[in-house]
Image: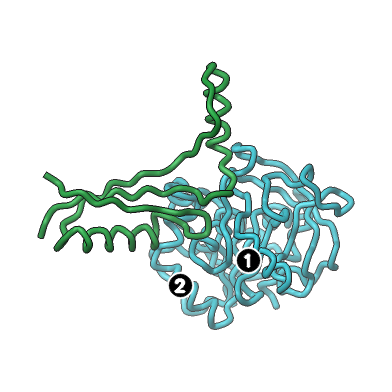
Chain colours: A cyan, B green
Amino acid sequence: MTIAVIQFGGSNCDRDSVQALESMGLEADLVWHEDGLPEDTTGIMLPGGFSYGDYLRAGAMAARSPIMAEIREAAADGTPVLGVCNGAQVGCESSLTPGVFTTNESARFQCEHVYLRVENAETPWTSQYDEGEVIELPIAHGEGRYEITDDRLDELEAEGRILFKYCDADGEVSPEANPNGSKHAVAGVTGDSDHVAVMMPHPERASLGDLDRTDGQPVLSGFAD
Amino acid sequence: MTAFTATVTVRLKHGVLDPEAETTQRSLERLGFELDDLRGADVFELDLDAEDDDDAAERAEEMAERLLANPTIHDYDVEVTERE
């Protein structure tokens, strides 16, 4: 099995993602978007970065790249897809996942550690956590505020499609613990099926034990299921 | 075929937070200007050849739907004028 980590012009978490996945014993390769999806692809990661300089809207250009049609097809056939940070923006812009990640409430780029509460522990990406568990991951984004209509968000909540919410160290969701003004403090959501997911915080940056915490490993292990 | 310019204006839907507009408004107020509200918008001018203005507008709308706007957060309008 090989996880394809898709490189767009301006991706910059691609190598970190491969390193994190390989450190967990998973096979991962960098795939340049123009080369198309390799035949042996068993998982797809859309990494963070600033694809196409965030022109127009973050993720908008990469989402219209031809490889995304292949990725949507693979996702529909059951291949797990995870979008992180810019990859999450690409996922939403390409309709793999609902909603949009847009300008932070602060209108600033924010690079900090945040606490996240696990909302649904029955997806491939969260099955190693407990529901309500609080984890700590880094964020690094200027456009991470989750936006969607109220009605649609209520549906997503009811369907258990919210993966994580920003919270404080005790798991309380509050405006103070919401770093970017995301609606309902949403930090990650699943697509129509839960093997497709996107999230703004970086699990791959909290996966190498020698460097820091390993709170992000369980997310990446979703590729192993 | 006639030469047209289709002007596509993309705005945030009413009620969607616009931190950049709020920051810009605060800066204007700091400069001493008084205003009640400020809304930003992106304007795209598309030069294209089309059978008539309906055809030009239709194509510009499709471009807005497919890329220039994100229907989750944006409204847009299209204005077509003949190009000299």
> Is A165 above or below relative to A55?
below
Which one is in front, A121 or A220?
A: A121
Q: Chain of mark 1?
A: A
Marks 2 and 1: which is nearer the front?
A: 1
Q: Chain of mark 2?
A: A
Whether residue A205 is visible here, answered yes or no, is: yes
Residue, disc 2:
A37
Furthest residue toward right? A170
Q: Position of residue A168 (x, y in %)?
A: 83, 48
Q: Left or right of A176: which side holds A1?
A: left
Amino acid at pointer 1: Arg
| SS at badge 1 | helix
Q: Position of residue A121 (x, y in %)?
A: 79, 70
* Residue depicted at x 63% and y 67%: A197
Residue, disc 1:
A152
> Is A98 above or below relative to A224?
above
The quarter in which the N terminus of chain B is drawn is bottom left
* Residue depicted at x 67% and y 51%: A182
Specify few, some or many for label 1: CA neighbours under 10 Å numbering under 14, 14-19, or 20 or more: few
| SS at badge 2 | loop
Amino acid at pointer 2: Leu
Q: Position of residue A131 (x, y in %)?
A: 84, 67
Specify few, some or many for label 2: CA neighbours under 10 Å numbering under 14, 14-19, or 20 or more: some
Where on the picture, by quarter, is residue A164? bottom right
> Is label 2 on the same chain as label 1?
yes
Furthest residue toward top? B32
